[in-house]
Amino acid sequence: MEGPKTSDKLFGNLALALLVAGLLVPFLIAMFAKEVIATGFGVVAILLALLFGIIGRKQKTGKVTLLIVGCLGVLVFVLVFGRRAEARSTMQRAIEKQAERNAAPPPSTPQAGNPESAR
């Protein structure tokens, strides 16, 4: 039997290293630079980890990387679309309250009486 290819092993290890770097290094970058730069670095590192994990998927490190990146992707998807749904429902409730306020008759003020009818 043939052993694992050297390139598969390299890509699997590189994928795992990029995943760890993509998760940890942005915290260090955010301490000294803008948060946008840290976020960009993290996203690019994780996308490269995904790519190299696909290339080195025959190795255990590549498989682990793909599993973790997949779970992170699902988590981000749920969080983003969950917040959008929450924002929509909040907006819908605000619209309904405004419609109720607009449809309700204005509060009536007690009239002091007609001065001509008092005569």
Image: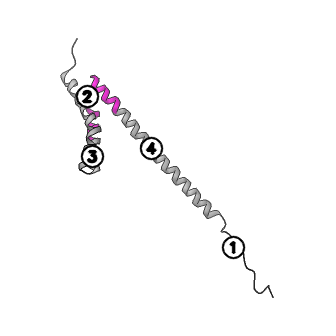
Which residue is at the front of the view, 6 or 33? 33
The total of numbered circles placed on residues is 4
> Distance between the Cα atoms at labels 2 and 4?
30 Å
Question: Dot 1 corresponds to which residue?
Answer: 109
State which mark lies toward you, 2 or 4. Answer: 4
| Mark found first going from the N terminus, 2 or 1 | 2
| Mark found first going from the N terminus, 3 or 2 | 3
Question: Dot 3 corresponds to which residue?
Answer: 38
| Mark found first going from the N terminus, 1 or 4 | 4
Question: Dot 4 corresponds to which residue?
Answer: 81
Circle 2: residue type: Ile
> Distance between the Cα atoms at labels 2 and 1?
76 Å
Circle 1: residue type: Thr
Q: Within the image, what quadrant is residue 118 found in?
A: bottom right
Circle 3: residue type: Ala
Q: Which residues are magenta?
A: 43-68
| Mark found first going from the N terminus, 4 or 3 | 3
